């Protein structure tokens, strides 16, 4: 039997909750399907989640199947715990809605050691609150059996400050399985991938470390069959590209390039030269190909043979320089058949010196070029 003060508090919360007619209907349904004692406990949990944690009625009813409170003491202590450790009200409500089970935890015994572990590794209080509010499941991982071993394994490859950066960009990296990661790294090493490239892969795309051995091996074999050299950076970039998209996304990107007259073989050859070729958005690919093929009259096959061209910024690089090229062609200063990757990939100083400054029309050309550059700002 609950004490009178607790009963009064419970009745007050239930009253607030029942002000909503739909809530009343739902709780009547609960009461009709449960014994009175269980119904009261269940309705209190739903009321607490709605009124204190900002749950919708539907999500509160769903969460109450997994968590139940007889009094507000335990969930209140959790909310206070997060507030005391730098979590804003919005962050606390966000993490409880994502993972209501945390409201059942003993904060000092279960949660505090995990926060202190992250603090001890150099993750700031602000960053911890931000990360946990988005990924509260980290707090459900075992400290001794998951978080510490994962961090210790990463120390073999990264300095401490780098691990912190990796964790901040991909918090779930602390849920990695050291055995799986060891397998992934060993495959790369055994096939001639330099350690510095392995580290680059893990730093730039740590989600790769969360792949199953089977999925990673499938991606690895696909990259090998494309003829990429494991000793070169492009090899791990290709792995990164393939692991960052689904099969359907890969096929959609192939279709985008096919619409510009490229064969599958040409596309894959371009990918082998520059894996970023397949990581661009459909909008970017269409805009770049439209610029080179329709506006400049270049062959799509030339772009496939020089795939780094598509990776440059349209606004800050390709469009301004294309305008200069169109002007030079229109004035008969360059042949229409002119094809040059240097025109687009050269540094700013080299481009100005080689294609603008030495011409009699340099003032006019430079004005045009700068106008196009200013439009991108």
Image: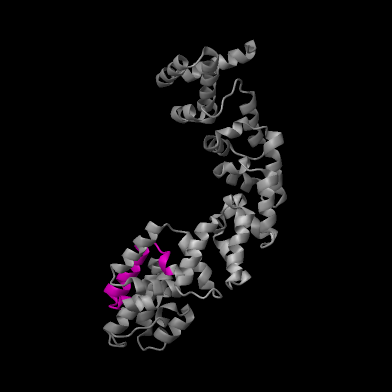
Magenta-drawn stretch contains 279: yes
Residue ID at (44%, 14%): 32
The image position of residue 230, as x and y in percent, is: 54, 73
Where 295 sits versus 280, above or below?
Answer: below
- Pick the front one: 147 or 145: 145
Look at the image and tell me whether residue 317 can be seen: no
The image position of residue 370, as x and y in percent, is: 40, 74
- In which quarter of the view is residue 245 placed? bottom left
Q: What stretch is highlighted in magenta?
A: 277-300
- Pick the front one: 284 or 36: 36
Image-based side of 58 in relation to 79, left or right: left
- In which quarter of the view is residue 70 placed? top right
- Pick the front one: 35 or 302: 35
- Pick the front one: 321 or 121: 121
- In which quarter of the view is residue 52 placed? top right
Magenta-drawn stretch contains 348: no
Where 96 sits versus 185, above or below?
Answer: above
Look at the image and tell me whether residue 25 can be seen: yes
Residue ID at (61%, 20%): 71
Quadrant where the image shows the C terminus: bottom left
Residue ID at (54%, 17%): 38
Quadrant where the image shows the N terminus: top right
Task: Decide whether the magenta segment is chiefly helix, strand or loop.
Answer: helix
Q: How many labels does the image show?
A: 0
């Amino acid at each position: 039997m609950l004490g009178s003060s607790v009963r009064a508090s419970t009745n007050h919360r239930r009253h607030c909750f029942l002000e909503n007619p739909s809530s009343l209907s739902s709780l009547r349904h609960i009461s009709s399907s449960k014994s009175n004692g269980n119904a009261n406990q269940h309705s209190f949990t739903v009321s607490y989640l709605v009124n204190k944690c900002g749950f919708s009625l539907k999500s509160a009813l769903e969460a109450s199947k997994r968590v139940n409170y007889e009094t507000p003491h335990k969930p209140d202590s959790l909310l206070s715990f997060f507030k005391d450790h730098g979590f804003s009200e919005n962050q606390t409500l966000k993490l409880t809605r994502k993972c209501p089970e945390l409201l059942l935890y003993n904060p000092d015994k279960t949660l505090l050691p995990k926060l202190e572990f992250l603090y001890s590794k150099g993750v700031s209080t602000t960053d911890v609150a931000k990360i946990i509010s988005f990924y509260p499941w980290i707090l459900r991982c075992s400290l001794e059996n998951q978080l510490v071993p994962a961090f210790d394994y990463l120390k073999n490859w990264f300095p401490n400050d780098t691990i912190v950066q990796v964790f901040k960009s991909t918090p779930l990296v602390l849920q990695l399985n050291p055995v799986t990661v060891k397998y992934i790294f060993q495959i790369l090493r055994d096939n001639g991938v330099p350690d510095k490239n392995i580290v680059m892969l893990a730093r730039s795309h740590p989600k790769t470390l969360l792949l199953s051995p089977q999925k990673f091996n499938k991606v690895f074999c696909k990259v090998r069959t494309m003829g990429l050299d494991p000793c070169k950076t492009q090899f791990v970039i290709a792995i990164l590209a393939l692991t960052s998209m689904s099969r359907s996304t890969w096929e959609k990107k192939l279709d985008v390039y096919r619409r510009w007259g490229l064969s599958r073989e040409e596309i894959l050859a371009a990918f082998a030269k520059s894996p970023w070729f397949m990581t661009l958005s459909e909008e970017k690919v269409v805009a770049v190909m439209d610029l080179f093929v329709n506006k400049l009259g270049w062959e799509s096959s030339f772009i496939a043979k020089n795939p780094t061209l598509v990776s440059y910024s349209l606004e800050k690089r390709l469009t301004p320089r294309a305008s200069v090229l169109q002007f030079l062609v229109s004035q008969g200063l360059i042949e229409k058949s002119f094809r040059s990757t240097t025109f687009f990939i050269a540094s700013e100083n080299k481009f100005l010196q080689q294609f603008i400054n030495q011409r009699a029309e340099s003032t006019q050309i430079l004005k045009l070029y700068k106008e196009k550059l200013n439009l991108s700002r």
